[in-house]
Image (spheres, rainbow, N blue to C red):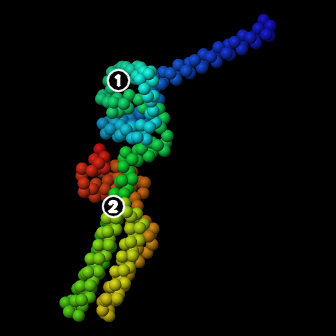
């Protein structure tokens, strides 16, 4: 056998193997598309991620959360399909084959799932979800931004109550020291009126923050300004007495220790929950979970139901 014949046979075998490999790849791609293996595997992976283990991946709450993730518009937009009667004929044929395959698979595995693999009677799903889209969708489904906001509201309200309690205790202690001296009656009337004003200012900060009209930095700055006004008014109206001077020093100490710097105040009071605390907020039995659930006055709210589930 001469060299040209060997070369012809070699090239022929190479082209045959190349064509067969391309054909096998196309057949595999066709089967994966018809039976939606990639989309189904992605859905199973998401269920395992949510459950944390394969033993819990078939629990009802895990399937429900996965269905909510797949119901998000961001995920739905990834699963586009053709429009029109003629364009939908191949897709409907694909659905029929895939549904028959899944029915046989569930029967053989004695699967207890009552809904379709993609949830809510959907017969198809995306085979790829970008990481950023999935992260955003999961955060929206778990309402993590809302949880962080509610935790901040709760802690800001506690911070407000603590600061008002400090101010009130200073005035009450001063009144006990001075007794029922009528010379100080007008001053204490002013002190309690001024306290009612700073209390109203602090409550307004909480309300504005809850309504989204004020961020946490602005809230602390408004509280600081209100506290400064209270101290200035206290200084202008207080009688010249050793007890009142000590009370003023006490108020200034509380103000400087609690409102020295906006970011320092937020950090020391833990007003902004960190990632670990937000994660613990959805773990039933954790301290953060208890802190959050006790602060939810509306027990029928969607966020409270999601935490319970």
- Residue at 67%, 15% (x, y): give it: 15
Establish if 14 lies above or below 122.
above
| Mark 1 or mark 2: whose residue is earlier in sequence | 1
Between marks 1 and 2 in the image, the one whose residue lies nearer the viewer = 2
Picture coordinates of residue 69, whole percent (x, y): 38, 40
Q: Is residue 226 above or below residue 98?
A: below
Q: Quadrant of residue 228?
A: bottom left
Estimate how packed mark 2 is, as few (under 14), some (14 to 19) or many (20 or more) residues with alpha carbons within 10 Å: some
Inspect this view and state whether residue 101 appears.
Answer: no
The quarter of the picture where the N terminus appears is top right
Q: Is residue 235 visible?
A: yes
- Report which quarter residue 209 is drawn in: bottom left
Q: Secondary structure at mark 2?
A: helix
Quarter of the view holding residue 24: top right
Residue underneath mark 2: 210
Give the image location of residue 270, x and y in percent. Answer: 39, 63
Quadrant placement of the C terminus: top left
Question: Which is more toward the observer, 233 or 39?
Answer: 233
Q: Position of residue 179 (x, y in %)?
A: 21, 89
Q: Are marks 1 and 2 in contact (CB under 8 Å)?
A: no
Residue 159 is labelled as none
Q: Is residue 177 left or right of residue 253?
A: left
Cα separation between marks 1 and 2: 48 Å
Disc 1 on helix, strand or loop? Answer: helix
Density class for disc 1 (Cα within 10 Å; few <14, some 14-19, many ≥20) is: few
Q: Which residue is mark 1?
A: 106
> What residue lies at 76% left-to-right and 8% top-to-bottom?
5
Q: How many marks?
A: 2
Residue 50 or residue 144, whichever sits in front: 144
Q: Is residue 4 left or right of residue 59?
A: right
Compared to 268, does 103 lie above or below? above
């Amino acid at each position: 056998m001469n060299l040209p014949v060997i070369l012809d046979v070699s090239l022929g075998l190479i082209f045959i193997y190349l064509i067969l490999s391309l054909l096998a790849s196309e057949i595999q791609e066709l089967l994966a598309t018809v039976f939606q293996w990639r989309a189904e595997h992605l859905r199973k992976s998401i269920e395992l991620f949510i459950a944390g283990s394969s033993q819990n991946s078939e629990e009802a709450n895990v399937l429900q959360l996965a269905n909510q993730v797949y119901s998000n518009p961001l995920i739905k937009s990834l699963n586009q399909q053709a429009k029109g009667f003629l364009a939908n004929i191949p897709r409907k044929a694909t659905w029929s084959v895939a549904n028959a395959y899944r029915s046989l698979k569930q029967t053989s595995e004695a699967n207890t799932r009552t809904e379709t693999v993609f949830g809510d009677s959907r017969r198809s799903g995306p085979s790829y979800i970008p990481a950023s889209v999935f992260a955003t969708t999961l955060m929206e489904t778990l309402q993590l931004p809302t949880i962080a906001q509610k935790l901040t509201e709760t802690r800001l309200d506690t911070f407000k109550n603590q600061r008002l309690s400090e101010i009130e205790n200073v005035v009450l202690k001063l009144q006990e020291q001075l007794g029922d001296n009528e010379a100080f009656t007008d001053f204490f009337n002013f002190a309690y009126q001024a306290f009612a004003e700073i209390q109203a200012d602090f409550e307004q900060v909480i309300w504005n923050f809850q309504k989204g009209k004020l961020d946490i930095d602005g809230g602390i700055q408004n509280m600081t300004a209100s506290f400064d006004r209270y101290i200035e008014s206290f200084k202008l109206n207080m009688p010249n007495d050793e007890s009142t001077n000590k009370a003023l020093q006490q108020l200034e100490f509380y103000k400087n220790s609690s409102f020295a710097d906006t970011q320092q105040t937020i950090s020391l009071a833990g007003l902004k929950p960190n990632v670990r605390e937000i994660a613990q907020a959805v773990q039933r039995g954790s301290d953060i979970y208890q802190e959050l659930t006790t602060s939810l006055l509306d027990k029928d709210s969607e966020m409270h139901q999601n935490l319970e589930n």
